[in-house]
Image (cartoon, helix red, strand yellow):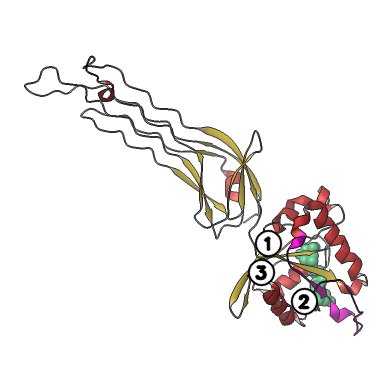
Amino acid sequence: MRFVDEAVIEAKGGDGGKGCVSFRREKFVPKGGPDGGDGGDGGSVILFGRENLQTLADLKYRRFYRAFRGRYGMGKNRHGRNGEDVRVPVPLGTDVYDYETMKKLGELVKHRQELVIARGGRGGKGNARFATSTEQAPRNSEPGARGEQRKFKLVLRLVADIGFVGLPNAGKSTLLSALTRANPKVATYPFTTLTPNLGVMKTKDFRFTLADMPGIIEGAHKGKGLGLRFLRHIERTKMLVFVVDAALGHPEQDYHQLCDEIKRYKEAILDRPRVIALNKVDLLLGKQPELNLGLPGVWISALRGDRVDELRELIDKLFPK
Ligand SMILES: Nc1nc2c(ncn2[C@@H]2O[C@H](COP(=O)(O)OP(=O)(O)OP(=O)(O)O)[C@@H](O)[C@H]2O)c(=O)[nH]1
Ligand SMILES: [Mg+2]
């Protein structure tokens, strides 16, 4: 399915049911007391996290969500039935904002975690509730309260353990295929990957989710290239794997450029552990220059699979568990 990481939706809670006006009728009691029941409460619109969803695409197609109304109260003190909730699954990592104020209302990062976004209205009281010592035959009841209605902006920031960052064409997607069973598109031109790809990497006793990102270019933090739209997808990772094309001859420069873009976007992202994959070593014809990048690294060929296992072990060792 198409990867969609932003959506605007509107939700309305169900209105409460009206309270009932009714009086007891019994064979030998001509004027029975009030017995109108309360209306049912309206249902709510509830978002919940679902782990196997990866995009907000469904919410792009369906924009309006309306929960059911509460039923009317009835005679003989019968309570109206409550309106049913409407539950909407969203991918893990969905942030929910009020559309008008852009205030963050919550996030869904765990499977089955819930957020009520539009509460249903309470049911109105029936006339039985209005009886007092002086008013024994009340003819009033309450209408149900209206359900909340609001517009929201949903923004997905993927939940993955490890994010790949690199310039376009560095071999990130090739590396994802080498480390996992994922099968992303790989091509000889830059900007092949337009939306993040996820894969699962297994080690002896751990399972990591890896996110392959579109290439980062200078100015990405300001929205250049695919810019911010995917830089945000590395925010929730716990570790970064930098992928550089070492065959181009300037891996240090590339690495510093990548760090710079991330730093300008959100410096704290650089606090997490990182490793560097110096890729395309097969094109280097044996020359592996001494590098002092200040982070652990492995010379690999993602294409041929050379030393990819070593990288896997390094990631496993440095990942904050
Ligand atoms: N020789 C060689 N080529 C490689 C290696 N890894 C990747 N490539 C090639 O480099 C090109 C780009 O690879 P991708 O995996 O698509 O690169 P990417 O970083 O995902 O690129 P974008 O998605 O555009 O950012 C492809 O032609 C790959 O076959 C490698 O280890 N050695
Ligand atoms: Mg790619």
Task: Identify residue type, mark 2.
Answer: Ala
Mark 1 or 2, closer to the camera: 1
- Residue for point 85% across, 81% down: 282
Find residue 243 and report its horizontal and vertical position in percent: 80, 69
Residue 289 drawn in magenta: yes
| Residue identified by numbered label 2 | 302
253 or 68: nearer the viewer: 253
* Above/below status of 58 relative to 234: above
Label 2 crowd (10 A; few <14 / some 14-19 / many >=20) = many
Query: Quick check: which quadrant has ligand 1?
Result: bottom right
- Residue 269, by quadrant, is bottom right
Q: Are marks 3 and 1 in contact (CB under 8 Å)?
A: no
Placement of the C terminus among the 4 image quadrants = bottom right
Instruction: Give how far apart the Cα atoms at labels 2 and 3 are.
Output: 24 Å
Mark 2 or 3, closer to the camera: 3
Placement of the N terminus among the 4 image quadrants = bottom right
* Above/below status of 19 relative to 68: above
Find residue 95 and report its horizontal and vertical position in percent: 62, 48
- Residue for point 65% across, 57% down: 158
Range of residues picked out in magenta: 270-295
| Residue identified by numbered label 3 | 320
| Residue identified by numbered label 1 | 237
Q: Is residue 226 visible?
A: no
Instruction: Give how far apart the Cα atoms at labels 3 and 1 are.
Output: 11 Å
Q: Earlier in the sequence, mark 3 or mark 1?
A: 1
Q: Is residue 217 visible?
A: yes
Q: Earlier in the sequence, mark 2 or mark 3?
A: 2
- Residue for point 21% across, 22% down: 34
Task: Classify residue 87 as left or right of residue 208.
Answer: left
Disc 3, ligand 1: is the CB inside 8 Å?
no
Find residue 151 and report its horizontal and vertical position in percent: 59, 35
Disc 2, ligand 1: is the CB inside 8 Å?
yes
